[in-house]
Amino acid sequence: MPMIKLQSSDGEVFQVDFEIAKASVTIKTMVEDLGLEEEDEEIVPLPNVNAGILKKVIQWATYHKDDPPATEDDEGREKRTDDISSWDADFLKVDQGTLFELILAANYLDIKGLLDVTCKTVANMIKGKTPEEIRKTFNIKNDFSPAEEEQVRKENEWCEEK
């Protein structure tokens, strides 16, 4: 099976099955643009992904290598947050920093399935929480004065559940 070498931002090189690496539209495009053949020894640099995160991305892509490609008409599915597989849920039981790094890597590498599942995980962390609980969960400082907060509440009361 043909392999490709991917280099993380911190210099670590990973040898990955070519078909697995093509889960990333970014890598697939780089390979095509560089005119690399499957037998070339060229290293593909990934300056926006560190080794720890790249290792997790490769692990995810390896597990999902036989998944059907995501289609653009999956909009209804995109809006659901209750369709995360048990493997993905376990895989994403990581600290917040790692989860956000995975989102950034999935976005940079253009891996739709990974981006969807990581964003759904964050959405589930937010769902049903008050603004105060969300601030606490994500360590966000409230920079609104009580008067500003009341104004925002009034402007948006139409969307509040009664």
Image (cartoon, helix red, strand yellow):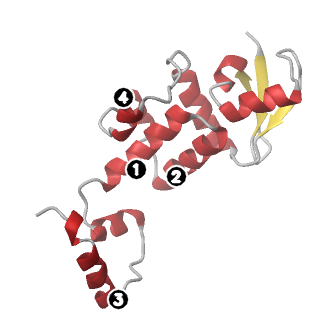
Q: Judge left or right: residue 3 versus residue 135.
A: right
Query: Mark 1 belongs to which amino acid?
Result: Val
- Looking at the picture, tell me which residue is in the foreground, 108 or 96: 108
Query: Mark 3 belongs to which amino acid?
Result: Ser
Secondary element at tag 3 = loop
Q: Tag 4: Cα neighbours inside 10 Å, few (<14), some, or many (≥20)?
A: few
Circle number at residue 122: 1
In whole angstroms, how far apart are the C-alphas of marks 4 and 1?
Answer: 15 Å
Query: Looking at the picture, how far across and down is residue 57, in whole percent?
Result: 59, 35
- N-term-proximal mark, 3 vs 2: 2
Secondary element at tag 1 = helix
| Pointer 3 residue | 145
Q: Indicate the quadrant where residue 3 lies.
A: top right
- N-term-proximal mark, 2 vs 1: 2
Circle number at residue 100: 2
In whole angstroms, how far apart are the C-alphas of marks 3 and 2?
Answer: 28 Å
Determine whether label 3 and label 2 are within 8 Å by CB.
no
Determine whether label 2 and label 1 are within 8 Å by CB.
yes
Query: Mark 2 belongs to which amino acid?
Result: Phe
User: Can the viewer see residue 160 in this picture?
Assistant: yes
Q: Mark 3 against mark 4, which lies toward the viewer? A: 3
Secondary element at tag 4 = loop
In whole angstroms, how far apart are the C-alphas of marks 2 and 1?
Answer: 9 Å
Q: Tag 3: Cα neighbours inside 10 Å, few (<14), some, or many (≥20)?
A: few
Q: Indicate the quadrant where residue 39 lies.
A: top right
Q: Judge left or right: residue 129 versus residue 89.
A: left
In whole angstroms, how far apart are the C-alphas of marks 3 and 4?
Answer: 41 Å
- Quarter the C terminus occupies: bottom left
| Pointer 4 residue | 85
- N-term-proximal mark, 3 vs 1: 1
The residue shown at (40%, 35%) is: 75
